[in-house]
């Protein structure tokens, strides 16, 4: 696992640009000689042919650079943390894919909202269905379990919350790693953090490190190949600091849904709503989701 410094730029692959630059330099150096040697064409025709060739080579260089960029896979639920992770990955100039899970969650509205954002950003999205209702044990996947409600953040009890979905993030990372292996992606980005929600065992730094080791032990990555990295850039940050980072990246949180109750309009009573409200208060701004809902007459 790499707890990537938030400001550290992605290591680029400049080779295609260097090689392409050499090709263009060679073309420029030989342009006049080439035009003189092709006597059957006029000077104007030679210049036109050269410009077409130059554009073709440039297009190929750009295409080749894109193909050799680092590819990142972002676990994207559509919540605040994963939205910030998506913009963070995009800001590092690589090719970004988003992976969303439809796991039978009570708040499936997040899938619809996630689709809206990736469509806006032009980011490819894959939605994988995995029915965790068959496992149950969580208020998010078992309709018979009540969703805990609170008056404020101080009322959220210690211990394993009823909204914990057993090994959910481990399941997600396992499936993401399988897909990344098929697609040749060597980096998985997730928005996990523990500062505001320390009672979830599958968001901790040691958990992510252990999952990364298990993934590289259990996939077909050869010793001379790059390992799959699970990058958790915000794991030791508060939610309000994650939001600030996202705002600096131009993140759009107006379609970012956090509420566990299952509606687009937040209930303002579940733990996720309470923590989100607290975070925006610390940021000192009004929640863009609330602003959008008010503008659309839904609040």
Image (spheres, helix red, strand yellow):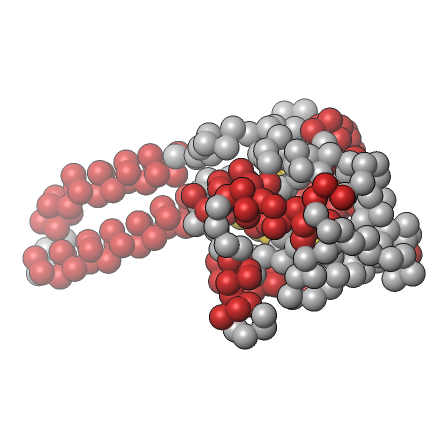
Residue 260 is drawn in which quadrant?
Answer: bottom right
Residue 202 is drawn in which quadrant?
Answer: top right
Q: Residue at x 11, y 45 (%)?
A: 32
Q: Which quadrant does the C terminus fall into? A: bottom right
* Nearest to the observer: residue 65 or residue 244: 244
Left or right, 25 with respect to 209, comes to left
Could you say where residue 142 lies in the image, as x and y percent from the top left? 88, 58
- Could one spot residue 264 in this view of the protein? yes
Could you say where residue 7 lies in the image, as x and y percent from the top left? 45, 32
Q: Is residue 10 above or below residue 50?
A: above
Q: Residue at x 90, y 50 (%)?
A: 137
* Nearest to the observer: residue 262 or residue 76: 262
Q: How many marks?
A: 0
* Nearest to the observer: residue 39 or residue 217: 217
Left or right, 189 with respect to 21, comes to right
Left or right, 39 with respect to 53, comes to left
* Nearest to the observer: residue 170 or residue 294: 294
Residue 236 is drawn in which quadrant?
Answer: top right
- Could one spot residue 220 in this view of the protein? no
User: As drawn, which residue projects farthest toward the top?
Assistant: 223
Q: Which quadrant does the N terminus fall into? A: top right
Q: Residue at x 30, y 49 (%)?
A: 58
Left or right, 237 with respect to 295, comes to right
User: As drawn, which residue projects farthest toward the bottom?
Assistant: 297
Could you say where residue 24 lies in the image, as x and y percent from the top left? 25, 42
Q: Is residue 116 above or below residue 50?
A: below
Q: Residue at x 39, y 34 (%)?
A: 15
Could you say where residue 114 lies in the image, as x and y percent from the top left? 61, 59
């Amino acid at each position: 696992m790499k707890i990537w410094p938030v400001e550290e730029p992605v290591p680029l692959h400049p080779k295609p640009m260097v090689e392409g630059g050499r090709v263009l330099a060679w073309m420029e150096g030989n342009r006049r000689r080439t035009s003189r040697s092709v006597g059957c064409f006029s000077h104007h025709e030679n210049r036109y042919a050269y410009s077409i060739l130059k554009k073709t080579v440039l297009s190929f260089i750009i295409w080749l650079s894109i193909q050799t960029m680092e590819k990142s896979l972002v676990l994207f639920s559509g919540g605040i943390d994963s939205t910030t992770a998506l913009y963070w990955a995009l800001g590092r100039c690589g090719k970004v894919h988003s992976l969303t899970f439809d796991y039978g969650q009570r708040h499936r509205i997040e899938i619809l909202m996630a689709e809206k954002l990736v469509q806006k950003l032009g980011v490819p999205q894959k939605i994988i269905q995995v029915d965790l209702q068959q496992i149950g044990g969580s208020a998010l996947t078992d309709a018979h379990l009540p969703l805990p409600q609170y008056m404020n953040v101080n009322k959220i009890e210690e211990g394993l919350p009823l909204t914990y979905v057993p090994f959910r993030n481990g399941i997600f990372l396992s499936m993401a790693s399988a897909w990344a292996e098929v697609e040749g992606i060597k980096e998985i980005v997730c928005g996990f953090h523990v500062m505001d929600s320390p009672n979830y065992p599958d968001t901790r730094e040691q958990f992510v490190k252990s999952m990364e080791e298990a993934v590289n032990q259990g996939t077909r990555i050869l010793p001379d190949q790059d390992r799959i990295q699970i990058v958790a850039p915000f794991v030791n940050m508060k939610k309000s600091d994650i939001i600030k980072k996202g705002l600096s990246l131009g993140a759009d949180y107006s379609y970012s849904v956090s509420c566990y109750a299952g509606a687009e309009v937040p209930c303002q009573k579940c733990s996720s709503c309470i923590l989100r409200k607290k975070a925006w208060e610390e940021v000192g701004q009004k929640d863009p989701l609330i602003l959008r809902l008010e503008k659309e007459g839904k609040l």
